[in-house]
Structures are given as C-alpha cells and as structure tokens.
Amino acid sequence: MESYYKYRRKKKIRKRTFFTIVILILVLILLIILRQSQIRLFREEKLPQALIHQLPKIKKVEISHANVTTDEDGDGINDQEDIFEGVKLELEKKAGNIITEGSLNYFEGGDPPPDKAICTDIIARALANAGYDLRMLVDRDIRENFEEYPWELWEVKIPDPNIDYRRPENLITFFKRNAKSLVLEIEPKNSQNLLQWIPGDIIFWDINRNGIVDHCGILSDRPNKENIPYVIHNYIEPGYTVEEDVLQKWLIVGHFRFPGK
C-alpha cells in the first residue's frame, strides 16, 4: 500500500515537472517571438515633446529672394547683402538717439559722430557699407528735381546737403524716385506676400497718421512668430539703435529696395 502511494506521488511530481517544463518552453518561445517582432510586453508611456518641437517653425527669409545683382563697391557681395550687413553693424554700435539726448541735430559734413544718430542716419550708414554716399545722391537728386521735394515743411528755398538727406520726408521722396517700390500691405498667412519683405529693405512710417513721414528703418532677418520680420531702427524709444518687432506698429507708407535695378 505504501509503495502504491509512493508511486502516485512520484507520478504527480513527474506530471508537474513535465507541465512546468512545457510552460517554460512556451514562455521562452513567446519571448523569442516578441523580441524578433520588436513587440514590447508593456506599453511605454508617451513622453511629452520638447517645447521647441511644439512651437511653429519660423524660417528666416533669405536675402537671395531679392534677386539683387548690383554690387556698387565691387566687393563681390550684392548691394542688398551689403546694406543688411551695414545695418547689423549699426545695431552693434547702438548709437544714442540725438533727439532723446537733446543734442543739436545739425552737423557740418552731414553725418553725426558714430555714437549718435537719428533714424535716417542708420539708413545712410547702411548704404555706405554698400558703397553709396546717400548725402551726395540725395543732394544731386534735389538739385536736379527741386520741385519734387516738400520744402514747404521747413520753409526753406535752397538745398542744404548737411541736413536734406537726414529728413525722412526728403528721403522717402528720393527712394520713390530712385529705388524699387514694394508692397505696403502685410499678409501673415500669405507666404508669397511675406517673401516680398526681405532683410535689407528700407521702410518708412507715418507714426502719427497725419500724412507726414516721420520715421524709417531697415528690415532684419529675425522673424516674429508670424514670420513677419523685425526692424533695425533708431527711435526716441528706447533711445538708441535697436532691433524690434515694430513693422506693423505704425502706418507703413514706404517699402523700398535700393537701388532696385
């Protein structure tokens, strides 16, 4: 009887051992299949994307879109790139605004000291980097087309090359006559429209919306979240040359590419 029970116990043990071995083999086979098919046993928690990948991608507008081929100073760099490079240099200098400082805004020879400026001085210095003497160019155009300029604003009857090219109203007249005039409307959702606003383009505003041109600047290659370019300019606020998102802040009355050939 005892031997019978021993026999039954051994049989059960062998049976459990057999099933255990079978289960282990099946588990091993399953693991091999899962590994080969790259299926994971547990679903991984999806980690949140980095913030930089969630933000809209902002692309800088390339100066090459301007298709400018002129090179006034013969340095192998086209005028649009030279003008943009020149205005970036002015940004580094951060010249103080002459009006904010309360300084006299008239200088023999025209250009103020490098550490002082108003908005038009930034334009003149940027163009100088491309080989253009804006003081001379404006004076020549004034003398040849005197009646085209708004002299009634200053009650003067003769040109003065030291100040004429530093007046926004004169400068926009000069660019209307000698540069390529471009669109004034900005359409953030229209990619073709945005491609017309190129770094190095010259912008004029009527800040007070009273029909008088009173400020100007040059487009930067830095875009805002809507892909509208910042502007490098010198204004009474903050009081020095700065790069700001102000293109749509005021009424745009002029948008030019110089020389526009």
Image (tube, grey):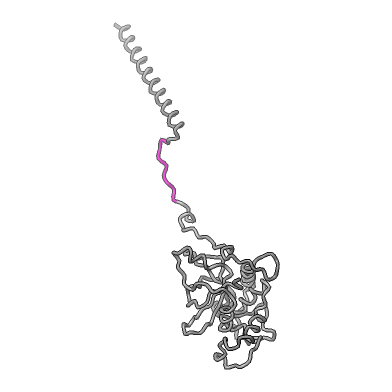
Residue 186 shown left or right of residue 10 in the figure: right
Outermost residue on the left side: it is: 1
Name the image quarter holding residue 171.
bottom right
| Quadrant in which the C terminus appears | bottom right
| Quadrant in which the N terminus appears | top left
Look at the image and tell me whether residue 119 can be seen.
no
Indicate the position of residue 238 as horizontal and vertical percent values. 55, 77
Instruction: Give the prevailing secondary structure in the magenta stretch.
Output: loop
Q: How many numbered marks have been drawn onto this rendered protein structure?
A: 0
Indicate the position of residue 208 as horizontal and vertical percent values. 48, 83
Above or below, comparing residue 112 to residue 14 in the picture: below
The residue at the point 63 percent across, 70 percent down is 83
Q: Is residue 191 magenta?
A: no
* Front-most of residues 209 and 159: 159
* Front-most of residues 36 and 189: 189
- Which residue range is magenta in the image? 40-48
Above or below, comparing residue 90 to residue 60 in the picture: below
The residue at the point 56 percent across, 73 percent down is 180
Indicate the position of residue 61 as horizontal and vertical percent values. 54, 63
The residue at the point 39 percent across, 24 percent down is 26
Residue 57 shown left or right of residue 11 in the figure: right
Residue 70 shown left or right of residue 28 in the figure: right
Look at the image and tell me whether residue 30 can be seen.
yes
Name the image quarter holding residue 25.
top left
Indicate the position of residue 65 as horizontal and vertical percent values. 56, 63
